[in-house]
Amino acid sequence: MEDDLVQKIKSNPNYQKLVSTRSSYGWMLTWLMMIVYYGFIVLIAFDKELLAAKMGPGVMTWGMPIGLFVIVFTVIITGIYVRRANSEFDDLTAEIRKEVL
């Protein structure tokens, strides 16, 4: 009985759409995060002078806002994913449940 349900779900076109859309979207956001994070690490490793350069007459260096940007970027792309998951992905999941069960 359970194998039949699994096969029904896997053969459902909405399930195929959900899996492909969610996977590609997740990987795109993963690559964006990796570029931002590892870009920051590369700056730390190879351009310490840029990060240590003062922004003005005070004590603020470029490393502080760039590091803050990495943290804020992480929160933003997480929010973007959650928003899409709560709307589009949840709607597709509900449709699949209606059709299969």
Image (cartoon, helix red, strand yellow):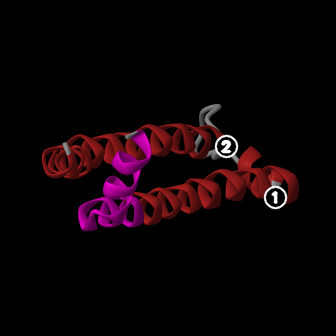
The reply to whether the magenta stretch includes residue 20 is: yes
Image coords of residue 80 (percent x, y): 32, 47
User: Which residue shows up at 15% across the image and 52% down it?
Assistant: 99
Crowdedness near tag 1: few (<14), some (14–19) or many (≥20) residues, C-alpha within 10 Å = few
Disc 2 marks which residue?
Answer: 63
Image coords of residue 45 (percent x, y): 86, 53
The reply to whether the magenta stretch includes residue 19 is: yes
User: Relative to 99, is 90 above or below?
Assistant: above
Decide which of 21, 96 is in the foreground and name it: 96
Decide which of 75, 96 is in the foreground and name it: 96
SS type, badge 1: loop
The prevailing secondary structure element of the residues shown in magenta is helix
Judged left or right of residue 18, residue 101 is left
Q: Quadrant of the N terminus?
A: top left
Crowdedness near tag 2: few (<14), some (14–19) or many (≥20) residues, C-alpha within 10 Å = many
Judged left or right of residue 21, residue 64 is right
Residue 24 badge: none
Of callouts 1 and 2, which one flags the residue occurring earlier in the amino acid sequence? 1
Indicate the amino acid at tag 2: Gly
User: Which residue shows up at 76% across the image and 45% down it?
Assistant: 52
Report, in whole angstroms, how far the alpha carbon at label 1 lies from the one at label 2. 10 Å
Indicate the amino acid at tag 1: Asp
User: Which stretch did the figure color magenta?
Assistant: 2-21
Judged left or right of residue 81, residue 100 is left
Name, please, the residue furthest toward the right.
45
Q: Quadrant of the C terminus?
A: top left
SS type, badge 2: helix
Decide which of 79, 86 is in the foreground and name it: 86
Disc 1 marks which residue?
Answer: 47
